[in-house]
Amino acid sequence: MREAGESAATVPAAPPLRLRAVGHRYGAGVVALRDIDLDVEAGTFTLILGANGAGKTTLANVMGGMLKPSSGSVEAFGAPVRYTENRALNHLGIVLVPERRRLFYRLTVRENVMLGAYSIKESRKQLDERMRAVLQPFPSSIRDRLDVVAGSLSGGEQQLLAVARALIAKPRLVILDEPSLGLAPRAIEAVYDLLAGAREQGATLVVIEQSGAVALQYVSHIAILERGREIYRGTVGSISQEQILAIGYVGHVESVETTSGEAS
Amino acid sequence: MNELPAVLVSGVVSGATYALLGLGIVIIFRSTDVVNFAIGDFGTFGVYVAFALLTRGLPLLIAAIAAVGVAGLLGVATERAVVRPLGPGKTFAALVLTLALSLILVSLAGQLFGHQPEPFPALVPGHVAILGLVVAWQKIATAALAVVAMAVIAFFMRFTRLGVAMRAAAEDHYAARVVGINRGLVAAIAWFIGCALAGLAALLLAPDATLTVTLMVAPLFRAFAGVFLGGLESMIGAAVGGFAIGVLDDLAGRYVSASFRDTFVFAIIVLVLFLRPAGLLAAQHRQRV
């Protein structure tokens, strides 16, 4: 477990996440991921785009420590990730915001945020102070409703709460699986504004989406998944908006060259 | 003389022990999805250990703590050695295994401690007259200790980090893992608390019932009735259900027929399952959320 004094800004030299030849198959036949190489450099904001069935959630679970891939290697901050049945990678400073949020809907907003800091040893007073600081940029619909049951929040508010639950963990790397799913553009922007703020404070971010419409204005790097395989990787400027937006609709990119090397 | 007050007091007191047992069943079920049919026998076993300590001259308080502790540790050992190796989702296999464990514990207790009923001393001896009604201090102590234990559990679940984590894990195992809650730890604690509550219930029942290997058979049956009444997912429901069954049971025993008590309790279970399978209180709970 990490100590309370450790700050999110102390980023070690090794990249937060390094995937090499990562593949995963469920049961006998279904291949969800094949041969994924991915470096997430410290301080970057990476968007991973893919259509339905491209392996997005599988990749998110692998990166977040929830699922041990059937092949390949995953390193976090220079050390091999040890996958265990019992818990994710919060103790390493890697936090997953899972698909469809997965809040504790019967618990209060306060309890949800509190549980985000479960891996951090600190006094209740320290936690309360940090909670106030972390929630400061959040809208009052979250900040002033700490004792409301999470299940009674709107979809957009729930996604914000999921982000708050991640940020209270002092994350060095946050992985978000489709944070914009089912949200109005306004609400999506609210989520990404908060993520941009977290990045300014030193966190590295990976966001996995089906549609990059809003995300593109915020991210620094892009990777594209198609049927479990990575078909493109580069910085934001290296691929046209039209090509990216096409992903969400047709599920594949025709004119982008397949990459094993960087296309930046 | 009007018997109703005495019957009600007796019902509330036995209801308190059913509430403890029911709460134990629900805490274990919520955290590991296992219905532990051996929970009553863990309690009985704990009280036998307490009895052995008493006969060796140890003070009642030490023996009482031992009863609760032994029951809790039996729960932890069962979760670790029997339930966890099955893997998640094997709820039916786990249920059958706890039934087997119950049979094993009953015969083991018989072998170790004998089948003769043993007199177990009252925690607090004597009687007191309240408004003309003579009540044994043991009954008052039973109700009071049960209520205190339930208040402690409520505080723990509501206000401590671990308690909140246990409620979170009960709601969503995956999300609990996401925030770094160790599922194994939560399961172990749930089994300890649940079975320790059974130990306390057995300890409170033993003085009136005398100590036998089947001490907890009838109370467990009633605790289950209470749990069905309140809903298998609801801690408050199990506690309230336990009290309700205690009172109904004694009312039926006095005013309907003493020999039809079990039938009466069973009829309540059937009726509730028929009308509201999720439990009377569980349904209300869901509407509120």
Image (cartoon, coloured by chain):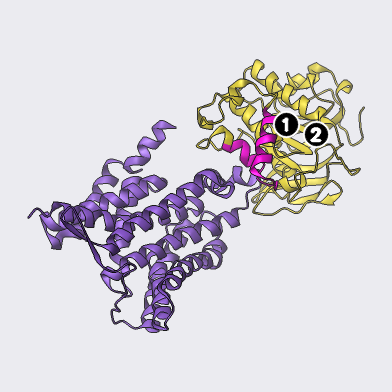
Residue at position x 43%, y 65% from top? B98
Residue type, label 2: Ala
Seen from the viewer's position, the closer of residues B175 and A208 is B175
Asked if marks 1 and 2 fall on the same chain, the answer is: yes
Q: Is residue A76 above or below residue B10?
A: above
Q: Position of residue A103 (x, y in %)?
A: 58, 36
Read off the magenta span.
A111-135
Residue B112's tag is none
Q: Which mark is residue A203?
A: 2
Residue tagged 1: A208
Residue B2 shows in this picture: yes
> Could you classify mark 1 by the number of other residues whose Cα lies within 10 Å: few (under 14), some (14-19), or many (20 or more)?
many
What is the tally of numbered marks visible in this picture? 2
Q: Quadrant of residue B198?
A: bottom left
- Give the answer, above or below, for where B289 lies relative to A81: above
Q: CA distance from mark 1 to mark 2?
A: 16 Å
Percent position (x, y) of residue B140? 29, 58
Q: Which chain hosts label 2?
A: A
Q: Is residue A135 left or right of residue B33?
A: right
Tell me if residue B126 is in the magenta stretch: no
Q: Colour of chain A?
A: yellow
Quadrant of the snapshot with the C terminus of chain A: top right
Query: Is A129 within the magenta?
Result: yes
Q: Is residue A103 visible?
A: no
How packed mark 2 is, by other alpha carbons closer than 10 Å (few <14, some 14-19, many 20 or more), is many
Which shade of the palette goes to chain B? purple
Residue at 65 percent of width and 51 percent of height: A28
Q: Amino acid at mark 1?
A: Ile
Q: Could you tell me which chain the residue with mark 1 belongs to?
A: A
Give the residue at x 67% y 42%.
A117
Q: Main secondary structure of the magenta part?
A: helix
In the rendered image, residue B35, in percent from the top left (x then y), is placed at 42, 57
